[in-house]
Image (tube, rainbow, N blue to C red):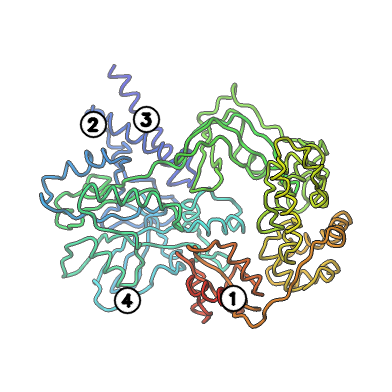
Amino acid sequence: MKKSLKKEIEELRNEIHYHNHRYHVLNHPEIPDYKFDELLYKLKHLENLFPHLITNNSPTKSVGGITLLNIKKINHIIPMLSLNNVFNEKDLFLKFLNPIKNLLNKTKNYFCCELKFDGIATSLLYNNGQLIQASTRGNGIIGENITNNILYINDIPHKLQGNNFPSILEVRGEIFMKKVNLNILNQNNIFNKQFANTRSAVLSFLRLKNINNNINYNLLNFFSYGIGFIQSKKKISSHIKILKQLKNYGLPISKHTTICTSLKEISFFYEKIKRERNNFLYNIDGIVIKIDNIKIQKILGCTSHAPKWAIAYKFPPQEKITILKNIIFQIGRTGVITPVGKFKTIKIDGVNISNASLYNINEIKKLNLKIGDVIVVQRCGDVIPKIINIIKKERKNNITTNIIFPKICPDCKSILKIKNYNKKTLYCPSDLNCKSQLKGYLKHFISRNAMNINYIGNQLINKLVDINLVKNPIDLFNLNINTLNKIPHLGNKSILKILNAIEISKKTTFTRFLYSLGISEVGLVTANNLNKHFQNLSNFLNADLKDFYSISGIGKKIAYNLYKFINDKKKLYIINKLVNEIGINWNNNIIISNFFYKKKIVLTGKLISINRLKVIEKLINLGAMIYNHISKNIDIIIVGKNPGSKIFKAKKLNIIIINEQQLLELINKN
């Protein structure tokens, strides 16, 4: 029995070492964090039960990964330790609060509660206020030298503010990346690879050897959360005071930090942050609880890998493991074929999930995905779930099967083609003759920001197309009582509402009409820019390719899409019928005396009291031009809650800044 137990522990250690290496060194984890935590917890439990089986090379005795051999190393003055984890209130009490209760005040204690950032732990060393060195945690004793790389991160000051700082100060914190910046990184394909999460993207930045102007380090951010070594005559009594002092030195700290005095207050803070986590600009995976009193911290001390005076209270996982059952191929309104993975149902954040988009065929090839694979599914907030990895060690060749890519459209049976400019994209060339594309197009056409036809929902569109009552948007406007009576379970009152809504929708705006046409990659903002540039439909339809190039915000790809669209005889036929026979019309008359007329505007942050799209629509109707990026040509920036870096650029360029309340007041005046 002892032999089998020893073997089980050894196999568990080997498995943890393997995943540790993939996570910290290769930057390519194979399993979700919570699965790794489960393995480590199981090993700790067994080692506690059988301490004579503990070895010096056990993962429970180390902090993290090993530094790469080809990267310069830095010895930490004081070890950079990891944190022990708990996942529920009961364990928080039993494993953290209860063991230290004898050292705590019986009446009132203070705990500093902070966010647990999903980034790279970093040490910054300042000598007489000047930054001289930076390193990662590494294995806790030796870290990777990242000094050259972090010099380009705006959040990290090269010199501390003021003159009352210690002669030597080691600041500890987290380098992280905002969610939106991960999207920018992946869209621009800067590293010639796609990143599944912000942490792996940050690590790739920090491990770059050759730094050049093409790499934008402004995509990275930093929060300080404490200090390591300090050489100072002043005694520090409180952790929260340390954070405030770091802020005074010019180092950024998170505003989501609070002092709690009981388990009840800690749990309240935890639940509050858990509810709000998806609204944050960056990823977090829990909170960190630290005893605020520095004297008690020193008395409690540390183990070889974690302090006894702090603990991480982690959120339930937003990643789950399941089994891929099938891949189906769907057709969108543009004809692009999108693979969708069907898997055994899992629950993440209380939501049952059984499928996830795989975007294109290259995603399947990149993951080396097979039917029957054990897969890792991620869901952050309310976004569409994503298959981020497979666990190859679980693959059983006698069970898994290769995925066969389609050669004909699953709907209309047309032979699929590959886009010339993007060989990873399959598409159906049949356009509106393919019912799946027609359904997607019509759903876009009637949507709120397009023709805004009420009382016609997705289900009705499906029925109208399936029984061949509607073959294009012209047929939609030619619906009458007789044709709608052919739809089962559709009463006379509903029919009258639908017909009335169709009639009302004929009076629209040029921007809405352009957007409703469903031109590839032309959103509401681009449609408005086209409106401003061409003023009327005739100018738009007679434009040349160079005319589209000259419009701000339109690149070569969108310009080509527009030019191709206006030279498509079928599209021109539909436009002519809609305007000249159906009677769709618009009035571009705008009161030019309003504040927003011809102003170039950028929005940043979350608007609370009004929907963002409604704001954009109102501004467009007032003659404004909406842009996504800050430049010296922008007139106004509208700022909501948690604005991004755009506001700092706007201040440097002296651009007019308007908050949400001021925006509403100005809109209501017009």
**Residues tagged 4 and 2 counted as in contact (Cβ below 8 A):** no
Query: Label 4, label 3: how many angstroms apart (C-alpha)?
Result: 49 Å
- Residue at (64%, 78%) from the top-left corner? 597
Q: Which mark is residue 48?
A: 2
User: What's under tag 1, amino acid-wise?
Assistant: Ser
Secondary structure under tag 4 reads loop
* Residue at the top extreme, as displayed: 1
Taking 307 as reference, is 132 left or right?
A: right
Q: Nearer the viewer, mark 1 or mark 3?
A: 1
- Residue at (73%, 57%) from the top-left corner? 516
Q: Is residue 192 above or below residue 620?
A: above
Q: Which mark is residue 12?
A: 3
| Residue situated in front as seen by the camera: 486 or 207 | 486
Secondary structure under tag 2 reads helix
Taking 119 as reference, is 361 left or right?
A: right
Q: Quadrant of the rendered structure where residue 150 is?
A: bottom left
User: What's under tag 4, amino acid-wise?
Assistant: Gln
The earlier-in-sequence mark between 2 and 1 is: 2
User: What's under tag 3, amino acid-wise?
Assistant: Leu
Identify the residue position indicated by label 4 in the image: 161
The earlier-in-sequence mark between 4 and 2 is: 2
User: Within 10 angstroms of label 2, few (less than 14), some, or many (20 or more) residues?
Assistant: few
The earlier-in-sequence mark between 2 and 3 is: 3
